[in-house]
Amino acid sequence: MNNSKAVLPTKGFALSFCAAAIGSLALLACGGNNDAVNISGVAATGAAMANATISIKCANGTIANTTTAADGSYAAAALGTFPCLIEASDATHKLHSVANGSGKVATANVTPLTEQLVASLLSADTADTAAFFANFDVSKAGTVAPDKVAAAQTKVLTDLAANGVDVSALKDLIGDKLVAKT
């Protein structure tokens, strides 16, 4: 005959377990998703693109949307993995950029120069950046690989310099800190 009594968890243990479970669920619901990438930057044409719509489309094809602040800045989490394309649009402009982050974070400014960079990634016959954004998926991810983006940036800067623009202060059209005119 076994006279040992079963040991039941204490009330404190049960409460701690419940709190941990609820906390884990809350973290997951509030951005703890490992499948998300975080992208931020500034959308500007010289002047900030205030209240512009930012659409982010990653290689898996999902789209995340946000709106820029008065200074053109934005930040958003998008489900998927890099690379991602960014589209900034307002009443008069539709511009594009590329996000190739390290880990799960990237900076991607969106300007007329990044629009030219994205166009440079495409063949001359199909330099429709809006159509490229609309059709972007994993099969086109190689088009925006970091080495190809670097080559496209070199082409843009070379073209600007050939037209008399001083590009000596321009280092990274996509990722450098940008403060738009407000």
Image (cartoon, helix red, strand yellow):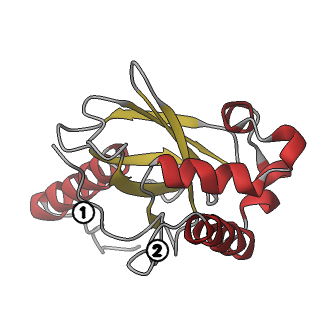
Mark drawn on residue 154: none
Q: Amino acid at mark 1?
A: Leu
| Residue density around tag 1, few if under 14, some if 14–19, many if 20 or more, within 10 Å | few
**Whole-percent x, y for residue 154 in the image:** 65, 74
Residue 10 makes an appearance in the image:
yes
In front of the other: 9 or 60: 60
| Residue density around tag 2, few if under 14, some if 14–19, many if 20 or more, within 10 Å | few
Give the residue furthest to the front. 164
Q: Residue at x 30, y 68 (%)?
A: 177
Residue 80 makes an appearance in the image:
no
Quadrant of residue 11 within the rendered picture: bottom left
Give the left or right position of residue 179, taking residue 99 as reference: left
Mark 1 lies on a secondary structure that is loop
Task: Classify 175 as above or below 69.
Answer: below
Give the left or right position of residue 168, taking residue 134 as reference: left
**What is the CA distance from the residue labelled 2 to the residue labelled 1?**
72 Å
Look at mark 2 in the image and give the residue it sits on. 167
Q: Residue at x 64, y 59 (%)?
A: 83
Look at mark 1 in the image and give the residue it sits on. 8
Disc 2 + disc 1, Cβ < 8 Å: no
In front of the other: 66 or 131: 131
Task: Classify 29 as above or below 11.
Answer: above
Q: Residue at x 63, y 72 (%)?
A: 158
**Whole-percent x, y for residue 112 in the image:** 49, 47
Give the left or right position of residue 95, taking residue 68 as reference: right
Image quadrant holding the N terminus, namely: bottom left
